[in-house]
Image (tube, rainbow, N blue to C red):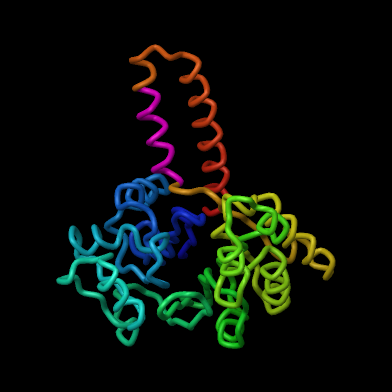
Amino acid sequence: MAKVVPVCSSSKGNSVFVGDSTSGVLVDAGCSFKALREGLALCGIPFEAVKAVLVTHEHIDHTKALGQITKRTSVPVYASDGTARRLFSDKLVEQTAVIHPLSEIKSVPVDMDIDFFHTPHDAAESVGYTLKFGEHKVACCTDLGYVTDEVRDNLLGSDTVYIEANYDPVLLKGNPKYPPYLKTRISGDHGHLSNGCSAEFCRELVAKGTSRLILGHLSQENNSPKMAYDAVEKTLKTAGMSCGVDFTLDEYALHFLLGGNFAVVRCFIFLLRKEKLWQYILYLWHLCLCLLIRSSSISRMW
């Protein structure tokens, strides 16, 4: 049975693997190629299992590894026409790269029925994806300012939904680092879903049969995993839905889940050589925390 494995998930990088250890697809590739390969390996998935990359839109936190993937591998990349044009014009891939149109998405060599739907976001032609295998259906949907009828029609009835809960409105409003125009962009109809909006949609999803919710694309600056989790759980509990009975709920807010850890390991070695013991202890604590979170995440996924 196929699994849904967030490889990286945050406002700085997003990539989700759907499949098993032998075959599957990546929805987006928003971390470095190295971090992507390492993240998959930590989950027991060799990069060779990736049979296609499905791009949602051209923003760098969803496309960072595409240049290397199209240059160094034969993995086919699929994107909407609008997104493809921006990938080339923004020089995110080389001009010689092959980007397959979504009209060819049925030819992806995996045992899944893949489809797409449009999402309201400030990109050229942003989309989300549904993936069916047997009687199971998975939906991946991030980067949308609000839930359109098209989004709702495609996601309702899915067994597993990977949905964004990007920001807490109070944190966003009070964030002194964000200028007014950026706050307006994030909270607008072509921005991102707040925790509250995501929670309301999750209630609809569970009412129509969704049994697993995965919250992703959480902002490091304007959200926290606990705030996102609590907002969704509270809304569903108020509607009479019980976590662990009617649905399961996971939240992923780790950027470069493995790549970041390897960076810490490399830093350990450097600090040991420099005999900066106090910094070594600090980084060791950080690594243990990352691995603990990651271990917990993997146990829930598998």
Residue 18, quarter of the rendered image = bottom left
Is residue 59 or residue 78 the one in the foreground? 59
**Which residue is drawn at the image coordinates 42% and 43% (left, top)?**
258
Residue 204, quarter of the rendered image = bottom right
Q: Position of residue 242 (x, y in %)?
A: 78, 62
**Which residue is drawn at the image coordinates 65% and 68% (left, top)?**
211
**In the picture shown, does residue 18 fall above or below 178?**
below
Tell me: 302 left or right of 244.
left
Tell me: 211 left or right of 30.
right
Is residue 224 or residue 26 the one in the foreground? 224
Tell me: 18 left or right of 302.
left
- Residue 170 in sight in this render: yes
Q: Assign the magenta stretch its main secondary structure.
A: helix
Count the numbered circles shown.
0
Q: Position of residue 231 (x, y in %)?
A: 74, 59
Query: Which residue is situated farthest in the left direction here?
Result: 96
Magenta residues, start to end: 257-269
- Residue 113 in sight in this render: no
Q: Position of residue 237 (x, y in %)?
A: 81, 63
Q: Quick check: is 264 in the magenta stretch?
A: yes
**Which residue is drawn at the image coordinates 53% and 71% (left, top)?**
141
Is residue 4 or residue 195 the one in the foreground? 195
**In the picture shown, does residue 226 fall above or below 141?**
above
Q: Position of residue 4 (x, y in %)?
A: 49, 61
**Which residue is drawn at the image coordinates 30% and 55% (left, top)?**
47
